Amino acid sequence: MASNLMRFDPFSEAARLDPFRNFEDIFRDFSMMPTLRGVESPPRIRIDVSETDNDYLVKADIPGVKKEDIKVSIDGNQVSVSAEVKEEKEAGGAGMLRSERYYGQEFRAFTLPQEVDDKKAVAKYENGVLHLTLPKKHGTGGKQLSIQ
């Protein structure tokens, strides 16, 4: 008599990684982790950082935020961006089937290879994207030590 039992392999889905699927989504779908189901991770500030000879250029997606609610701080080569996402008062209630909009504090910090001249830094916010132009501070690059 043949058995219809199959061995459960929780990593079988991880072996078939879809390059466009978020790694967190894979683990959220595991039936072994029922406590994580339905828990949405808060939106994150997504950034692109590019470099020219003189500047670092940062684009940060922060949709649905007023520019007054965005704060950027620079400390040497450390850059942090925070944004207050405010709740919109809307008539919800009985007709609301699902609400995924988030309100609260978002924060993102990153380190650049070279210090930033914070006196010349420029920030612009338009269409939900924060544009930072962060000039490099000349003469503060890493020092190569000679071995004796």
Image (spheres, rainbow, N blue to C red):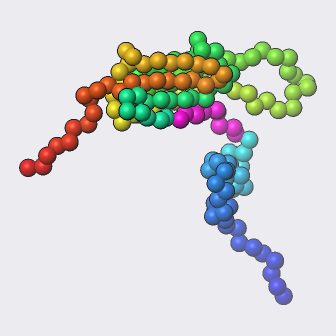
Q: Which quadrant is home to the N terminus?
A: bottom right
Stretch of the chain drawn in magenta: 39-48
Q: Is 11 left or right of 47, judged from the image as shown?
A: right
The residue that appears at 91% across and 24% down in the rendered structure is 94
Depth check, front residue: 127 or 62? 127
The vertical placement of 22 against 59, above or below, is below
Where is residue 137 shown, x and y percent of the image? 32, 25
Where is residue 64 shown, x and y percent of the image? 68, 21
Q: Say if the magenta span includes residue 47.
A: yes
Quadrant of residue 118 in the image?
top left
Quadrant of residue 52 in the image?
top left
Where is residue 78 shown, x and y percent of the image? 39, 28
Residue projecting furthest to the left: 148
Q: Is 89 left or right of 109, judged from the image as shown?
A: right
The vertical placement of 76 against 24, above or below, is above
Depth check, front residue: 125 or 92? 125
Where is residue 61 shown, x and y percent of the image? 61, 29
Residue 64: in sight, yes or no?
A: yes
